[in-house]
Image (spheres, rainbow, N blue to C red):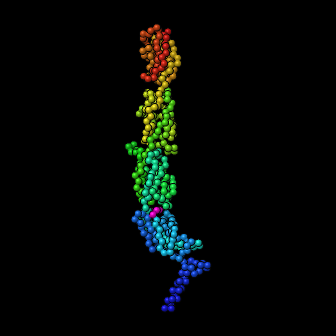
C-alpha cells in the first residue's frame, strides 16, 4: 500500500510541473477536453468541452480547422466544467472538420486533442427579408437583406445567380446585407431572350429560398432633335438607355418599323443616327430597343418643305433650272408643276432640278410654279412668266 502511494504522488508532481514556470510552481495546469460534438437539426454544430484550472483573465474557446484554414470561437462567459458554443455559420454541408478546445493564458496556450466531425447539416440557412430593386439595368447594384446577421459571413460563402449567370458580389455590409451586380443574363438565342431572371442564392452550398425576379428596365426617350431635317439628315435621341460601362448586347432603332442601319453614336444617354432618304413619313414612329426592352416615341421629326430660291425663264418645251433647297436627292420623287401641268424632270439633286416646261394652256402667259416631294411637303408658290 505504501508503494502505491509513492507512485501516485510521483504522477501528481509531474502534472503540476507540466507547462509551468518557476513562479507558478505548484499551480494546477489548465486542461480542456472535448467529450462531444452535436449536430444541430436546423444547421450547424454544438461544441462541448470540459475546462478546468483556468484563471478569470484566461481566454477560452474552440478552434475549427479545415483545408480552407481555421477559425477561433471565443466563449464569452466561461465557467469551470462544461462549456458549449453553437456554430451555425461558416460550415459546408458534409465537409470534414477538426475541432479542439483551448485555454490561452498570459504566457501560454493549452489545447485539447483534436476531434474530427462532419458538418452533416452544414450551416443554418439564412432567411431573406428583402431584395431590391426588382427593376433595373444590367450592371445595376442589387441589395439582398437577410432577416438577421450572419456572423463571420464572407463573400466566398455565397453564390448568387440571375438565370444561369453569376452575379458579382461586391460587398457584405454589417453581416446582414449583400451587395451584388446584375450580370448579363440574356441568352444569345433569338427565341430565349427573356427580359427577366429569377435569382438563386446558395450559402455554403445550401440553397437559400428566394422568389425574387429581376426585370430589365425599359429604356426612356426624353427628346428627339432637331424637329426639322433634310433628306438623309441626322437626328439625336436623348434619354436613358442603359447603365454606363455595361453596353447592351442587343440595341436597335426602328423608324416606322424599318431598322436603322446607320447609327453613328450610342451612349447611355444619347443616340445619333442618319435617317434613310427612303423614309418619307413626317413625324414617324421611333422604336428604340435596348436589351430586348423597348420604348416608342411618336413626337419625332418632320422634313423641311422644298424651297425655291430662283429659276430660269423659258418657253413651253424649254429645259430650265430650278435652284433651291430640300429637294429629294434623286429626280423621281420630286414633282414640279406649272399650274396643274406636271413637268418632266430631266435631272435632280437636293439643291437643283432640271425640268422641261410642260405644254398647256396658260392664262396671261403666266403659271404658278411649285415643287413637291410628298403630298404634305410643297414649296411656296412662285409666279413663272413665259418668254
- Residue located at (43% from left, 12% from top): 359
- Report whether residue 202 is seen: no
- State yes or no: residue 35 in magenta: no
- Residue located at (42% from left, 16% from top): 342
- Counting from the top left corner in percent of width and height, residue 151 is at 49, 61
Q: Would you identify the image quadrant in which residue 361 lies? A: top left
- Counting from the top left corner in percent of width and height, residue 72 is at 51, 66
| 16 versus 225 height, above or below | below
Q: Nearer the viewer, residue 223 or 85?
A: 85
User: Total number of numbered labels?
Assistant: 0
Q: Nearer the viewer, residue 22 or 127?
A: 127
In the visual, does 324 lie left or right of 287? right
In the visual, does 51 lie left or right of 24? left
| 246 versus 276 height, above or below | below
- Residue located at (47% from left, 70% from top): 84
| 280 versus 341 height, above or below | below
- Report whether residue 282 is seen: yes
- Residue located at (44% from left, 10% from top): 362
- Counting from the top left corner in percent of width and height, residue 323 is at 52, 19
- Counting from the top left corner in percent of width and height, residue 275 is at 47, 31
Q: Look at the image and give the residue range highlighted in magenta.
A: 88-92
- State yes or no: residue 90 in magenta: yes
Question: Magenta stretch: dominant SS?
Answer: loop
Q: Residue furthest top?
A: 364
Amino acid at each position: 500500500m505504501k508503494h502505491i502511494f509513492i507512485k501516485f504522488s510521483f504522477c501528481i508532481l509531474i502534472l503540476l510541473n507540466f507547462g509551468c514556470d518557476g513562479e507558478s510552481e505548484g499551480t494546477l495546469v489548465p486542461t480542456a477536453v472535448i467529450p462531444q460534438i452535436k449536430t444541430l437539426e436546423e444547421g450547424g454544430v454544438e461544441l462541448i468541452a470540459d475546462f478546468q484550472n483556468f484563471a478569470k483573465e484566461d481566454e477560452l474557446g474552440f478552434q475549427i480547422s479545415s483545408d480552407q484554414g481555421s477559425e477561433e470561437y471565443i466563449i464569452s462567459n466561461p465557467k469551470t466544467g462544461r462549456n458549449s458554443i453553437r456554430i451555425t455559420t461558416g460550415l459546408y454541408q458534409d465537409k470534414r472538420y477538426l475541432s479542439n478546445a483551448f485555454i490561452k493564458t498570459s504566457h501560454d496556450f493549452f489545447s485539447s486533442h483534436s476531434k474530427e466531425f462532419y458538418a452533416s447539416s452544414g450551416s443554418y440557412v439564412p432567411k431573406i427579408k428583402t431584395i431590391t430593386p426588382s427593376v433595373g439595368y444590367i450592371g445595376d447594384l442589387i441589395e439582398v437583406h437577410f432577416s438577421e446577421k450572419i456572423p463571420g459571413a464572407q463573400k466566398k460563402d455565397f453564390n448568387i445567380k440571375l438565370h444561369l449567370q453569376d452575379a458579382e458580389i461586391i460587398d457584405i455590409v454589417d453581416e446582414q446585407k449583400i451587395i451584388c451586380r446584375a450580370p448579363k443574363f440574356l441568352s444569345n438565342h433569338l427565341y430565349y431572350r427573356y427580359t427577366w431572371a429569377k435569382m438563386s442564392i446558395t450559402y455554403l452550398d445550401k440553397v437559400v429560398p428566394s422568389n425574387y425576379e429581376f426585370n430589365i428596365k425599359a429604356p426612356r426617350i426624353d427628346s428627339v432633335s432637331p424637329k426639322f431635317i433634310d433628306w438623309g439628315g441626322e437626328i439625336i435621341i436623348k434619354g436613358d438607355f442603359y447603365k454606363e460601362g455595361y453596353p447592351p448586347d442587343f440595341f436597335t432603332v426602328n423608324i416606322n418599323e424599318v431598322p436603322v442601319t446607320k447609327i453613328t453614336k450610342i451612349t447611355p444617354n444619347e443616340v445619333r443616327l442618319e435617317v434613310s432618304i427612303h423614309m418619307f413619313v413626317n413625324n414617324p414612329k421611333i422604336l428604340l430597343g435596348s436589351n430586348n426592352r423597348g420604348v416608342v416615341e411618336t413626337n419625332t421629326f418632320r422634313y423641311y418643305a422644298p424651297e425655291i430660291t430662283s429659276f430660269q425663264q423659258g418657253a413651253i418645251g424649254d429645259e430650265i433650272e430650278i435652284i433651291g433647297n430640300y429637294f429629294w436627292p434623286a429626280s423621281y420623287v420630286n414633282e414640279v408643276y406649272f399650274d396643274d401641268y406636271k413637268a418632266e424632270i430631266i435631272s435632280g439633286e437636293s439643291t437643283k432640278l432640271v425640268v422641261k416646261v410642260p405644254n398647256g394652256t396658260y392664262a396671261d402667259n403666266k403659271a404658278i410654279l411649285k415643287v413637291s416631294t410628298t403630298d404634305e411637303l410643297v414649296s411656296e408658290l412662285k409666279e413663272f412668266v413665259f418668254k
